[in-house]
Image: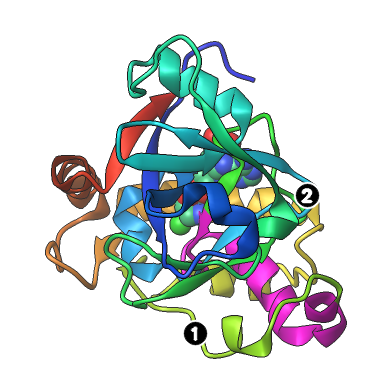
Amino acid sequence: EGVLPQEYVLIKMEVVPPFPPKFKALEGRKVYLAAATLRPETMYGQTNCWVLPDGKYGAFEITDTDVFILTSRSALNLAYQNQSRIPEKPTCLAELSGTDLIGLSLKSPLAFNEVIYALPMMTILTDKGTGIVTSVPSDSPDDFMALQNLITKPALRAKFGVKDEWVLPFKVIPIINIPEFGDKSAEKVCVDLKIKSQNDKEKLAEAKRMTYLKGFTDGTMIVGEFNGRKVQEAKPLIKNKLLEEGTAILYSE
Ligand code: A2H
């Protein structure tokens, strides 16, 4: 881990009612899966959300109206950063596991898909961010491979109770052009490096290196309000837009 704090944008992915039985204590509240991202400018291309099936999460009271689902570790950090109504100790309204979250319907800011689903990802770290990750398979090699694995492996879907209609209709959405890699940079690099699985850590690290920096230095937005602008310029503008409209907040660790 680095010595400097990392600043993430927490994307508020709203859980669309009706809530499942485990969410009884949350009835009548606005409930969000809080996804930590370093790439707010990619939110147009969200196709789903990732949770760790064995992960421990909680539904924490963050304001009078808002409940966030995230790890207790990140809820506490957030409270110390004064984002919570009760700074000392945010109240946990429900303890939830990743499996309880799989299949939730979500409405996420900027996403072209009106509703997306929470799906299992095995490589989520519970000691980083919130333990909730939003999925942008056009620009994230991790997201592309995890989604590809679910699409091509019916047994993997069956294992986690993932319905076909939560996965199969959702296509990679081109949102950023990188001259070297085209409009779906993550897919291109994963194919070029012949990556077969979301667990292929070394090759995925290489794919991330290749796309992450190039996306920032050479990428151009091809959708949204800042269509035609360089990613470098669009990134802070989109971040501020999300913060101002209240669909995202900042989080550091
Ligand atoms: B990024 P860093 Cl399009 N476990 O968001 C695993 N991965 C996590 C995580 C966790 N607990 N919390 C956040 N992340 C992911 C978008 C994105 C991201 C794109 C391209 C690259 C990319 C959409 N997913 O990250 O270790 C989140 O995915 C490449 C590094 O703190 C977050 O940003 O640098 C990023 O990893 C944070 O990783």
Q: Is residue 21 left or right of residue 27?
A: right
Residue occupying the point 43% across, 50% down: 32
The answer to whether residue 62 shows anywhere in this view is yes
Q: Is residue 217 left or right of residue 89?
A: left
Residue 125 placement (x, y as % from top left): 70, 39
Residue 35 placement (x, y as % from top left): 48, 47
Q: Which residue is mark 1?
A: 171
Q: Quadrant of residue 85?
A: top left
Specify start and end residues of the magenta stretch as a single range.
134-158
The disc, 2 or 1, on the residue closer to the chain's N-terminal end is 1
Mark 2 to mark 1 CA distance (whole Å): 26 Å
Residue occupying the point 66% across, 64% down: 102
Comparing labels 2 and 1, the label whose residue is closer to the camera: 1
Residue occupying the point 43% across, 68% down: 17
Q: Secondary structure at mark 2?
A: helix
Task: Describe the colour scheme in one phrase.
Answer: rainbow
Q: Which residue is mark 2?
A: 202
Q: Quadrant of residue 154?
A: bottom right
* Residue 34 included in the magenta stretch of the image: no
The answer to whether residue 141 shows anywhere in this view is no
> Which amino acid, mark 1?
Lys
